[in-house]
Amino acid sequence: MQSSYIYIEGINGIPFKVLLNSSEKPMLGKNYYILTTEVSGENKIEIQFSGDVYETQNFILDVLPGSSYGYKLAKAGDNRFYLMDLINNGKIIETNSAVNIGLTTELNTIHFDQGPAIVEKKVAKETVVIEDVKSEPVIEQESRSERKKKKKELAEAEKMAAAQAKQEEKEKAKEFGVVEVIRSTDVAEKKEEIKVEEKKVAQEPVQSVTKKTCLRNASENEINSFVEKLKQKSDDEAKLILIKKKIFTGCITAMQLYQMVEVLETQYGRFSFIKFIKPEVNVASDLVQLEPLFKYDSYKQKLKKLSEE
């Protein structure tokens, strides 16, 4: 498969190292990594800190072939961390979360042409990465005047960011005690919306994980109505949160589940949806009928195993 690239930027003053799928990777720059992976689907990113001053932070990234990803590590209160997506408008990815994962959008896709075409993509506001089908990403060469101008702009931006971070560290959010190192107020507002929605999920009743006796199946009208609600959600994370809040009036058939799962866009999201709702399926062995929804053999094997449990 085509290689995919992952840019990880750390926090100034906090030494760290990165493991991709349990394999330690070399740091290429002073405070960042550029990882290469040929593993499609789930990729586990572990961030460890020198001297074990903080616990290892684990993130899940759902990788598609020929894609690039850019993240900046940020620290929240109570020794909690998160990743800020530099490509997808600062989307927040929480650590140690089975729902809030790194997903792929059109912005992540590298559009390879025939021949050794070069694809240019902004990984961060200050850095432009050049991606070649035959080589690792390299930094674009610029004229001396352009570099001087950019260096000045970077220095000013870093000075402002440092001042803002210092001020933000003095204030803790009332509910979570979170101190965010984020430059965009839009990103901060989006994080708060995610927290509120997740809090609602925790407070409201969710489906039992115990297999219940099926006296009847959910009606087609109920399934169709829920499918429409899923379609209104912007991404797979929101759809997974919605299914955790849903209580069906009866059991689910494999074909009804197929209607719901095909609305999700990512392989990881689809499998997570099926795994969560499995106790509501009337015939677990019928889950193999959902195999056409998956592109990769790894997920097909997981689906087969799930149907046999």
Image (cartoon, helix red, strand yellow):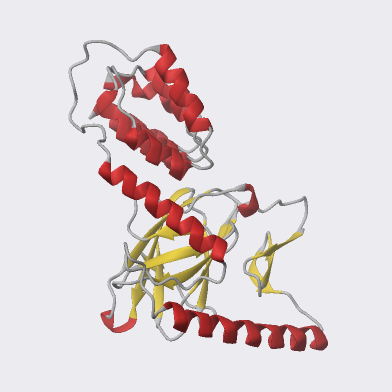
Q: Which residue appears at 63% of the width and 81% of the height?
A: 157
Q: Is residue 19 above or below residue 96?
A: below
Foreground pick, 177 / 79: 177
- Most extreme residue toward the front is 174
Q: Is residue 275 above or below residue 92?
A: above
Q: Is residue 134 above or below residue 235?
A: below
The answer to whether residue 99 shows anywhere in this view is no
Q: Is residue 227 above or below residue 23?
A: above
Q: Which residue appears at 82% of the width and 87% of the height?
A: 145
Foreground pick, 42 / 217: 217
Q: Is residue 137 left or right of residue 27?
A: right
**Quarter of the image where one finds residue 142:** bottom right
In the rendered image, residue 292, in percent from the top left (x then y), is placed at: 48, 26
**Quarter of the image where one finds residue 5:** bottom right
**Quarter of the image where one finds residue 119:** bottom right
Q: Is residue 216 left or right of residue 259?
A: left
In the picture, which quadrant includes the C terminus?
top left
Report the number of numbered marks: 0
Q: Which residue appears at 50% of the width and 56% of the height?
A: 190
In the rendered image, residue 1, in percent from the top left (x then y), is placed at: 57, 48
Q: Is residue 211 left or right of residue 10?
A: left
In the rendered image, residue 154, in percent from the top left (x then y), is placed at: 65, 83
Q: Which residue appears at 35% of the width and 16% of the height?
A: 253
The answer to whether residue 114 shows anywhere in this view is yes
In the rendered image, residue 215, in percent from the top left (x then y), is placed at: 21, 11
